[in-house]
Amino acid sequence: MHISEHIMGIRLNFNEVIALRTLAYGMSGTDIMEIQAMLRKINYNIGPIDGVFGAQTRSAVQRFQRRFGLTPDGIIGPATWPVMERFLLGYDLYAVRSGNTVYGIAQAYGTSVQAILTANPDIDPNRLSVGRQLIIPYGFPVVDTNISYTYEVFQRDVQGLKARYPFIETGLAGQSVLGKDLTYLRLGTGSNEVFYNASHHALEWITTPVLMKFIEDFAFSYSRGQSLGSGYNPADIWQRSSLYFIPMVNPDGINLVLDGLSPDNPYYSRLIEWNGGSSNFSTVWQANIQGVDLNHNYNAAWEQSKQAEEQLGITGPGPTRYSGTAPESEPESRAVADFTRNHDFRLVMAYHSQGEVIYWDFMNLAPPEGRSIGEEFSRESGYLLDIAEGVASYAGYKDWFIQDWRRPGYTIEVGRGRNPLPISQFNSIYARNLNMLLLSSII
Ligand SMILES: [Zn+2]
Protein backbone atom coordinates (compact mmCIF):
# COMPACT_ATOMS: atom_id res chain seq x y z
CA MET A 1 0.00 0.00 0.00
CA HIS A 2 1.27 3.45 -0.87
CA ILE A 3 0.12 6.49 0.97
CA SER A 4 1.69 9.78 0.16
CA GLU A 5 2.39 11.82 3.23
CA HIS A 6 1.39 15.14 1.71
CA ILE A 7 -2.18 13.98 1.41
CA MET A 8 -2.25 12.67 4.95
CA GLY A 9 -1.98 14.70 8.06
CA ILE A 10 -5.23 16.51 7.70
CA ARG A 11 -6.81 15.71 10.98
CA LEU A 12 -10.57 15.89 10.82
CA ASN A 13 -13.10 15.00 13.44
CA PHE A 14 -13.19 11.32 14.17
CA ASN A 15 -15.54 10.03 16.76
CA GLU A 16 -13.42 8.75 19.56
CA VAL A 17 -14.79 5.23 19.80
CA ILE A 18 -12.89 3.94 22.78
CA ALA A 19 -10.45 5.55 25.16
CA LEU A 20 -7.07 4.04 24.42
CA ARG A 21 -4.21 3.42 26.84
CA THR A 22 -0.63 4.34 26.09
CA LEU A 23 1.25 1.32 24.79
CA ALA A 24 4.99 0.75 25.12
CA TYR A 25 7.71 -1.87 24.97
CA GLY A 26 7.24 -4.73 27.43
CA MET A 27 3.46 -4.45 27.65
CA SER A 28 1.00 -7.03 26.38
CA GLY A 29 -2.69 -7.21 25.62
CA THR A 30 -5.39 -7.60 23.03
CA ASP A 31 -5.00 -3.92 22.02
CA ILE A 32 -1.38 -4.61 21.09
CA MET A 33 -2.52 -7.59 19.07
CA GLU A 34 -4.94 -5.32 17.21
CA ILE A 35 -2.12 -2.83 16.49
CA GLN A 36 0.15 -5.62 15.27
CA ALA A 37 -2.51 -6.91 12.88
CA MET A 38 -3.03 -3.37 11.58
CA LEU A 39 0.70 -2.76 11.08
CA ARG A 40 1.01 -6.02 9.19
CA LYS A 41 -1.93 -5.02 6.95
CA ILE A 42 -0.04 -1.90 5.93
CA ASN A 43 3.08 -3.92 5.27
CA TYR A 44 5.17 -3.54 8.39
CA ASN A 45 7.04 -6.60 9.51
CA ILE A 46 5.98 -7.07 13.12
CA GLY A 47 6.80 -10.74 13.57
CA PRO A 48 4.09 -12.90 15.08
CA ILE A 49 0.76 -11.35 16.07
CA ASP A 50 1.06 -12.31 19.70
CA GLY A 51 -0.11 -9.27 21.66
CA VAL A 52 3.37 -8.73 23.10
CA PHE A 53 5.01 -5.34 22.56
CA GLY A 54 8.50 -6.64 21.83
CA ALA A 55 11.47 -5.30 19.92
CA GLN A 56 10.03 -6.03 16.48
CA THR A 57 6.76 -4.29 17.29
CA ARG A 58 8.62 -1.30 18.71
CA SER A 59 10.76 -0.99 15.65
CA ALA A 60 7.66 -1.18 13.42
CA VAL A 61 5.98 1.52 15.51
CA GLN A 62 9.07 3.73 15.12
CA ARG A 63 9.03 3.27 11.35
CA PHE A 64 5.32 4.09 11.34
CA GLN A 65 6.01 7.23 13.37
CA ARG A 66 8.78 8.41 11.04
CA ARG A 67 6.58 7.85 8.03
CA PHE A 68 3.82 10.02 9.44
CA GLY A 69 6.05 12.75 10.87
CA LEU A 70 5.66 11.73 14.50
CA THR A 71 8.41 11.57 17.11
CA PRO A 72 9.87 8.08 16.67
CA ASP A 73 9.86 7.14 20.35
CA GLY A 74 8.27 3.72 19.78
CA ILE A 75 5.49 4.58 22.23
CA ILE A 76 1.87 4.62 21.17
CA GLY A 77 0.62 7.63 23.10
CA PRO A 78 -1.76 10.54 22.47
CA ALA A 79 0.11 11.72 19.36
CA THR A 80 0.45 8.33 17.66
CA TRP A 81 -2.92 6.83 18.58
CA PRO A 82 -5.06 9.13 16.41
CA VAL A 83 -2.94 8.38 13.35
CA MET A 84 -3.07 4.65 14.02
CA GLU A 85 -6.76 4.79 14.72
CA ARG A 86 -7.54 5.68 11.11
CA PHE A 87 -5.90 2.47 10.05
CA LEU A 88 -7.69 0.51 12.76
CA LEU A 89 -10.98 1.92 11.48
CA GLY A 90 -9.86 1.37 7.90
CA TYR A 91 -10.58 4.83 6.55
CA ASP A 92 -9.42 8.41 6.60
CA LEU A 93 -11.34 11.64 6.31
CA TYR A 94 -10.03 13.95 3.63
CA ALA A 95 -11.03 17.48 2.74
CA VAL A 96 -10.98 18.05 -1.01
CA ARG A 97 -8.42 20.55 -2.28
CA SER A 98 -8.42 22.51 -5.47
CA GLY A 99 -7.45 20.31 -8.41
CA ASN A 100 -8.19 16.99 -6.67
CA THR A 101 -9.83 14.20 -8.58
CA VAL A 102 -11.33 11.03 -7.14
CA TYR A 103 -8.82 9.08 -9.19
CA GLY A 104 -5.90 11.11 -7.85
CA ILE A 105 -7.07 10.72 -4.26
CA ALA A 106 -7.54 6.98 -4.77
CA GLN A 107 -4.01 6.71 -6.16
CA ALA A 108 -2.54 8.67 -3.27
CA TYR A 109 -4.26 6.46 -0.72
CA GLY A 110 -3.63 3.18 -2.47
CA THR A 111 -7.32 2.54 -2.75
CA SER A 112 -9.87 2.35 -5.56
CA VAL A 113 -12.19 4.90 -7.12
CA GLN A 114 -15.03 2.43 -6.57
CA ALA A 115 -14.35 2.25 -2.82
CA ILE A 116 -14.43 6.04 -2.55
CA LEU A 117 -17.65 6.33 -4.55
CA THR A 118 -19.30 3.63 -2.43
CA ALA A 119 -18.35 5.40 0.79
CA ASN A 120 -19.49 8.79 -0.55
CA PRO A 121 -22.63 7.99 -2.54
CA ASP A 122 -23.79 11.59 -2.86
CA ILE A 123 -20.72 13.07 -4.55
CA ASP A 124 -20.43 13.86 -8.22
CA PRO A 125 -16.95 12.60 -9.13
CA ASN A 126 -16.73 15.17 -11.93
CA ARG A 127 -17.53 18.07 -9.65
CA LEU A 128 -15.71 17.71 -6.37
CA SER A 129 -16.24 20.82 -4.32
CA VAL A 130 -13.21 22.18 -2.52
CA GLY A 131 -13.40 21.62 1.22
CA ARG A 132 -15.86 18.81 0.84
CA GLN A 133 -15.05 16.08 3.38
CA LEU A 134 -14.68 12.60 1.94
CA ILE A 135 -14.45 9.21 3.55
CA ILE A 136 -11.47 7.41 2.05
CA PRO A 137 -11.44 3.64 2.69
CA TYR A 138 -7.97 2.16 2.69
CA GLY A 139 -7.15 -0.65 0.31
CA PHE A 140 -7.44 -3.44 2.88
CA PRO A 141 -10.35 -5.19 4.63
CA VAL A 142 -11.75 -3.88 7.91
CA VAL A 143 -12.51 -7.08 9.81
CA ASP A 144 -9.46 -8.81 11.25
CA THR A 145 -9.78 -12.56 11.52
CA ASN A 146 -6.42 -13.28 13.11
CA ILE A 147 -6.73 -11.56 16.51
CA SER A 148 -8.63 -11.76 19.78
CA TYR A 149 -11.94 -10.18 18.90
CA THR A 150 -12.74 -7.92 21.84
CA TYR A 151 -15.65 -5.54 22.21
CA GLU A 152 -13.36 -2.64 21.22
CA VAL A 153 -12.32 -4.41 18.02
CA PHE A 154 -15.97 -5.14 17.28
CA GLN A 155 -17.04 -1.53 17.79
CA ARG A 156 -14.23 -0.17 15.61
CA ASP A 157 -15.14 -2.66 12.91
CA VAL A 158 -18.80 -1.62 13.05
CA GLN A 159 -17.76 2.00 12.61
CA GLY A 160 -15.32 1.10 9.85
CA LEU A 161 -17.86 -0.95 7.91
CA LYS A 162 -20.57 1.66 8.30
CA ALA A 163 -18.21 4.32 6.92
CA ARG A 164 -17.21 2.24 3.90
CA TYR A 165 -20.68 0.90 3.22
CA PRO A 166 -23.20 3.56 4.26
CA PHE A 167 -26.05 1.32 3.10
CA ILE A 168 -25.46 -0.89 6.16
CA GLU A 169 -27.98 -0.01 8.85
CA THR A 170 -26.64 -0.13 12.39
CA GLY A 171 -28.32 0.50 15.70
CA LEU A 172 -28.68 -0.44 19.30
CA ALA A 173 -30.57 -3.54 20.42
CA GLY A 174 -29.79 -2.89 24.09
CA GLN A 175 -26.89 -2.68 26.47
CA SER A 176 -24.96 -5.21 28.53
CA VAL A 177 -24.85 -5.25 32.33
CA LEU A 178 -21.73 -3.06 32.18
CA GLY A 179 -23.27 -0.69 29.64
CA LYS A 180 -21.62 -1.97 26.47
CA ASP A 181 -23.66 -1.55 23.30
CA LEU A 182 -25.45 -4.56 21.91
CA THR A 183 -25.10 -3.31 18.36
CA TYR A 184 -27.17 -4.70 15.55
CA LEU A 185 -26.43 -4.46 11.84
CA ARG A 186 -28.78 -4.92 8.93
CA LEU A 187 -28.18 -5.80 5.29
CA GLY A 188 -30.95 -5.68 2.75
CA THR A 189 -34.34 -4.06 2.57
CA GLY A 190 -36.57 -6.99 1.62
CA SER A 191 -39.58 -8.24 3.53
CA ASN A 192 -38.10 -11.67 4.31
CA GLU A 193 -36.52 -11.02 7.72
CA VAL A 194 -33.83 -13.35 9.03
CA PHE A 195 -31.74 -13.04 12.17
CA TYR A 196 -28.23 -14.10 13.11
CA ASN A 197 -26.70 -13.76 16.53
CA ALA A 198 -23.37 -14.86 17.95
CA SER A 199 -21.41 -15.08 21.18
CA HIS A 200 -24.10 -15.74 23.75
CA HIS A 201 -21.22 -17.67 25.32
CA ALA A 202 -18.06 -15.74 26.14
CA LEU A 203 -15.59 -18.48 25.25
CA GLU A 204 -17.21 -18.77 21.83
CA TRP A 205 -16.20 -15.28 20.69
CA ILE A 206 -14.76 -16.67 17.42
CA THR A 207 -18.36 -16.70 16.16
CA THR A 208 -18.48 -12.87 16.24
CA PRO A 209 -15.85 -12.36 13.52
CA VAL A 210 -17.60 -15.09 11.49
CA LEU A 211 -20.68 -12.86 11.25
CA MET A 212 -18.64 -9.66 10.89
CA LYS A 213 -16.56 -11.07 8.05
CA PHE A 214 -19.75 -12.22 6.37
CA ILE A 215 -21.20 -8.71 6.67
CA GLU A 216 -18.04 -7.23 5.16
CA ASP A 217 -17.91 -9.73 2.30
CA PHE A 218 -21.60 -9.29 1.57
CA ALA A 219 -21.36 -5.49 1.61
CA PHE A 220 -18.30 -5.51 -0.61
CA SER A 221 -19.85 -7.88 -3.16
CA TYR A 222 -23.12 -5.96 -3.11
CA SER A 223 -21.35 -2.64 -3.70
CA ARG A 224 -19.44 -4.08 -6.66
CA GLY A 225 -22.33 -5.98 -8.19
CA GLN A 226 -20.42 -9.23 -7.73
CA SER A 227 -21.63 -12.67 -6.73
CA LEU A 228 -20.66 -14.24 -3.42
CA GLY A 229 -20.08 -17.85 -2.36
CA SER A 230 -21.35 -20.45 -4.82
CA GLY A 231 -23.01 -17.99 -7.14
CA TYR A 232 -25.28 -16.14 -4.72
CA ASN A 233 -26.33 -12.70 -5.87
CA PRO A 234 -26.19 -10.12 -3.06
CA ALA A 235 -28.31 -7.66 -5.07
CA ASP A 236 -31.15 -10.20 -5.32
CA ILE A 237 -30.83 -11.05 -1.64
CA TRP A 238 -30.87 -7.33 -0.81
CA GLN A 239 -34.24 -6.96 -2.57
CA ARG A 240 -35.80 -10.05 -1.11
CA SER A 241 -34.53 -10.12 2.43
CA SER A 242 -33.44 -8.15 5.46
CA LEU A 243 -30.56 -9.80 7.27
CA TYR A 244 -30.27 -8.71 10.89
CA PHE A 245 -27.20 -9.43 13.00
CA ILE A 246 -26.36 -9.11 16.67
CA PRO A 247 -22.78 -10.34 16.38
CA MET A 248 -21.79 -9.91 20.04
CA VAL A 249 -24.51 -10.81 22.53
CA ASN A 250 -22.17 -11.08 25.51
CA PRO A 251 -19.51 -8.34 25.31
CA ASP A 252 -18.85 -8.19 29.07
CA GLY A 253 -18.12 -11.90 29.19
CA ILE A 254 -15.95 -11.78 26.08
CA ASN A 255 -13.75 -9.01 27.43
CA LEU A 256 -13.45 -10.85 30.73
CA VAL A 257 -12.22 -13.92 28.87
CA LEU A 258 -9.89 -12.04 26.53
CA ASP A 259 -8.60 -9.18 28.68
CA GLY A 260 -8.84 -10.72 32.14
CA LEU A 261 -10.45 -9.27 35.24
CA SER A 262 -9.70 -5.61 35.75
CA PRO A 263 -9.55 -4.29 39.34
CA ASP A 264 -12.07 -1.58 38.47
CA ASN A 265 -14.68 -4.13 37.40
CA PRO A 266 -17.67 -3.53 39.71
CA TYR A 267 -18.10 -7.31 39.99
CA TYR A 268 -14.42 -7.89 40.79
CA SER A 269 -14.66 -9.81 44.07
CA ARG A 270 -17.92 -11.54 43.20
CA LEU A 271 -16.49 -12.80 39.92
CA ILE A 272 -13.55 -14.41 41.68
CA GLU A 273 -15.91 -15.99 44.19
CA TRP A 274 -18.25 -17.21 41.42
CA ASN A 275 -15.21 -18.58 39.61
CA GLY A 276 -14.30 -20.81 42.54
CA GLY A 277 -11.66 -18.45 43.87
CA SER A 278 -9.74 -18.28 40.61
CA SER A 279 -8.94 -15.07 38.79
CA ASN A 280 -8.31 -16.95 35.54
CA PHE A 281 -11.41 -16.74 33.38
CA SER A 282 -9.78 -17.31 30.00
CA THR A 283 -10.65 -20.98 29.54
CA VAL A 284 -13.79 -21.41 31.65
CA TRP A 285 -16.09 -18.40 31.59
CA GLN A 286 -19.17 -18.70 29.35
CA ALA A 287 -21.61 -16.53 31.30
CA ASN A 288 -22.32 -12.82 31.33
CA ILE A 289 -20.76 -10.59 33.99
CA GLN A 290 -23.42 -11.58 36.54
CA GLY A 291 -22.56 -15.25 36.19
CA VAL A 292 -25.69 -16.09 34.21
CA ASP A 293 -25.45 -18.40 31.20
CA LEU A 294 -27.34 -16.34 28.63
CA ASN A 295 -28.23 -19.36 26.57
CA HIS A 296 -30.03 -20.84 29.58
CA ASN A 297 -31.95 -17.68 30.26
CA TYR A 298 -34.80 -17.82 27.73
CA ASN A 299 -38.35 -18.78 28.47
CA ALA A 300 -38.36 -22.29 27.01
CA ALA A 301 -38.30 -25.10 29.57
CA TRP A 302 -36.50 -22.62 31.79
CA GLU A 303 -37.75 -24.44 34.91
CA GLN A 304 -36.19 -27.68 33.68
CA SER A 305 -32.97 -25.81 33.10
CA LYS A 306 -33.21 -24.50 36.65
CA GLN A 307 -33.93 -27.94 38.10
CA ALA A 308 -30.98 -29.46 36.26
CA GLU A 309 -28.63 -27.07 38.06
CA GLU A 310 -28.69 -29.11 41.25
CA GLN A 311 -27.51 -32.30 39.52
CA LEU A 312 -24.76 -30.27 37.93
CA GLY A 313 -23.69 -28.88 41.29
CA ILE A 314 -24.62 -25.35 40.32
CA THR A 315 -25.84 -23.31 43.26
CA GLY A 316 -25.67 -19.80 41.89
CA PRO A 317 -23.84 -17.50 39.49
CA GLY A 318 -20.80 -19.06 37.88
CA PRO A 319 -18.88 -19.75 34.69
CA THR A 320 -21.55 -21.83 32.96
CA ARG A 321 -25.09 -23.20 33.03
CA TYR A 322 -26.56 -21.02 35.76
CA SER A 323 -29.98 -20.04 34.38
CA GLY A 324 -30.47 -16.85 36.40
CA THR A 325 -33.35 -15.97 38.68
CA ALA A 326 -35.98 -15.84 35.92
CA PRO A 327 -36.23 -16.06 32.13
CA GLU A 328 -34.79 -12.93 30.52
CA SER A 329 -33.44 -11.76 33.87
CA GLU A 330 -30.36 -10.45 32.05
CA PRO A 331 -30.27 -7.31 29.88
CA GLU A 332 -28.45 -9.20 27.11
CA SER A 333 -30.99 -12.02 26.72
CA ARG A 334 -33.85 -9.57 27.16
CA ALA A 335 -32.44 -7.37 24.40
CA VAL A 336 -32.14 -10.31 22.01
CA ALA A 337 -35.66 -11.49 22.90
CA ASP A 338 -37.08 -7.98 22.48
CA PHE A 339 -35.29 -7.61 19.17
CA THR A 340 -36.88 -10.88 18.07
CA ARG A 341 -40.35 -9.82 19.25
CA ASN A 342 -39.99 -6.50 17.45
CA HIS A 343 -39.39 -8.21 14.11
CA ASP A 344 -41.03 -10.94 12.12
CA PHE A 345 -38.19 -13.39 11.62
CA ARG A 346 -38.80 -16.18 9.20
CA LEU A 347 -35.69 -17.99 10.38
CA VAL A 348 -33.00 -17.49 13.05
CA MET A 349 -29.49 -18.79 13.55
CA ALA A 350 -27.61 -18.64 16.84
CA TYR A 351 -23.88 -19.11 16.46
CA HIS A 352 -21.90 -21.11 19.00
CA SER A 353 -18.73 -23.21 19.11
CA GLN A 354 -17.85 -26.05 18.98
CA GLY A 355 -18.71 -29.46 17.48
CA GLU A 356 -19.58 -28.91 13.79
CA VAL A 357 -23.21 -29.62 14.52
CA ILE A 358 -26.51 -27.96 13.63
CA TYR A 359 -29.29 -28.25 16.22
CA TRP A 360 -32.67 -27.71 14.66
CA ASP A 361 -35.44 -28.88 17.04
CA PHE A 362 -36.83 -28.22 20.47
CA MET A 363 -39.20 -30.72 22.11
CA ASN A 364 -40.61 -31.72 18.71
CA LEU A 365 -41.96 -28.22 18.21
CA ALA A 366 -39.99 -27.35 15.08
CA PRO A 367 -42.10 -27.10 11.92
CA PRO A 368 -41.53 -29.83 9.29
CA GLU A 369 -39.40 -27.49 7.19
CA GLY A 370 -37.14 -27.01 10.22
CA ARG A 371 -35.65 -30.37 9.47
CA SER A 372 -35.59 -30.14 5.67
CA ILE A 373 -33.94 -26.72 5.73
CA GLY A 374 -31.52 -28.07 8.33
CA GLU A 375 -30.62 -30.86 5.91
CA GLU A 376 -29.77 -28.30 3.26
CA PHE A 377 -27.64 -26.38 5.76
CA SER A 378 -25.92 -29.62 6.65
CA ARG A 379 -25.13 -30.25 2.99
CA GLU A 380 -23.75 -26.71 2.54
CA SER A 381 -21.60 -26.75 5.66
CA GLY A 382 -20.70 -30.38 6.15
CA TYR A 383 -21.96 -30.04 9.72
CA LEU A 384 -24.03 -32.85 11.21
CA LEU A 385 -27.74 -32.27 11.76
CA ASP A 386 -28.61 -33.26 15.32
CA ILE A 387 -30.96 -32.82 18.27
CA ALA A 388 -29.60 -31.52 21.56
CA GLU A 389 -30.08 -33.80 24.56
CA GLY A 390 -30.12 -33.17 28.31
CA VAL A 391 -29.37 -29.86 29.92
CA ALA A 392 -28.01 -28.32 26.72
CA SER A 393 -31.52 -28.54 25.29
CA TYR A 394 -33.21 -26.14 27.72
CA ALA A 395 -33.83 -22.41 27.73
CA GLY A 396 -31.60 -21.51 24.82
CA TYR A 397 -32.35 -18.83 22.27
CA LYS A 398 -33.23 -21.13 19.39
CA ASP A 399 -35.38 -23.27 21.75
CA TRP A 400 -37.41 -20.24 22.69
CA PHE A 401 -37.72 -19.09 19.10
CA ILE A 402 -38.94 -22.51 17.90
CA GLN A 403 -41.34 -22.80 20.82
CA ASP A 404 -42.94 -19.37 20.46
CA TRP A 405 -42.89 -18.95 16.68
CA ARG A 406 -42.91 -22.53 15.36
CA ARG A 407 -40.54 -21.39 12.67
CA PRO A 408 -37.07 -22.65 11.70
CA GLY A 409 -34.47 -21.86 14.34
CA TYR A 410 -30.94 -23.22 14.52
CA THR A 411 -27.98 -23.42 16.82
CA ILE A 412 -24.85 -23.66 14.72
CA GLU A 413 -21.86 -25.13 16.54
CA VAL A 414 -18.78 -24.18 14.52
CA GLY A 415 -15.31 -25.62 14.72
CA ARG A 416 -13.75 -28.48 16.59
CA GLY A 417 -11.71 -28.76 19.75
CA ARG A 418 -11.89 -27.17 23.12
CA ASN A 419 -13.36 -23.72 23.73
CA PRO A 420 -12.08 -21.13 23.26
CA LEU A 421 -11.17 -22.29 19.79
CA PRO A 422 -7.93 -20.79 18.48
CA ILE A 423 -8.45 -17.99 15.99
CA SER A 424 -6.28 -20.02 13.60
CA GLN A 425 -9.45 -22.05 12.89
CA PHE A 426 -11.18 -18.98 11.52
CA ASN A 427 -10.60 -19.53 7.81
CA SER A 428 -11.77 -23.13 7.77
CA ILE A 429 -14.84 -22.21 9.86
CA TYR A 430 -15.72 -19.32 7.62
CA ALA A 431 -15.35 -21.41 4.48
CA ARG A 432 -17.91 -23.86 5.82
CA ASN A 433 -20.40 -21.20 6.84
CA LEU A 434 -20.39 -18.74 3.96
CA ASN A 435 -22.78 -20.59 1.66
CA MET A 436 -24.99 -21.63 4.55
CA LEU A 437 -25.34 -18.01 5.65
CA LEU A 438 -26.23 -16.94 2.13
CA LEU A 439 -28.68 -19.78 1.66
CA SER A 440 -30.39 -19.09 4.98
CA SER A 441 -31.23 -15.57 3.89
CA ILE A 442 -33.41 -16.69 0.99
CA ILE A 443 -34.54 -20.22 1.77
ZN1 LIG B 1 -22.48 -21.98 23.25
Image (spheres, rainbow, N blue to C red):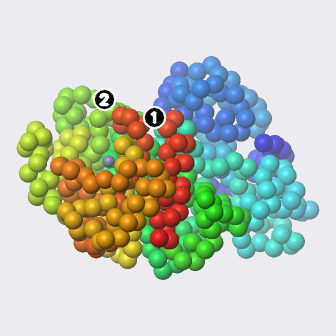
Q: Residues within 10 Å of mark 1 (few under 14, many from 20)?
A: some
Give coordinates of residue 311: x percent, y percent. 8, 42
Give coordinates of residue 69: x percent, y percent. 77, 36
Query: Is residue 340 placed above or below 387 in the rendered structure?
Result: below
Q: Circle 1 is placed at which residue position?
A: 422
Quadrant where the N terminus is found in the figure: top right
Judged from the image, the secondary structure of the residue bearing numbered disc 2 is loop
What residue type is disc 1 on? Pro
Q: Which image quadrant for residue 94?
A: bottom right
Q: Circle 2 is placed at which residue position?
A: 280
Please name the residue shown 49% across and 27% down the image: 28
Q: Are marks 2 and 1 in contact (CB under 8 Å)?
A: no
**Front residue of 380 and 154:** 380
Please name the residue shown 81% across and 43% down the image: 2
Query: Is residue 174 placed above or below 190 in the rendered structure?
Result: above
Q: Marks 2 and 1, Cα distance to the nearest angstrom?
A: 17 Å
What residue type is disc 2 on? Asn
Q: Which image quadrant for residue 202?
A: top left
Q: Residues within 10 Å of mark 2 (few under 14, many from 20)?
A: some
**Front residue of 187 and 414:** 414
Give coordinates of residue 196: x percent, y percent. 42, 61
> Farthest residue toward the right?
99
From the viewer's perspective, is 186 left or right of 103? left
Q: Which of the two marks, 2 or 1, is nearer to us in this view?
A: 1
Give coordinates of residue 50: x percent, y percent. 53, 28
Please name the residue shown 65% across and 27% down the image: 46
Judged from the image, the secondary structure of the residue bearing numbered disc 1 is loop
Q: Is mark 2 within 8 Å of ligand 1?
A: no
> Farthest residue toward the bottom?
191
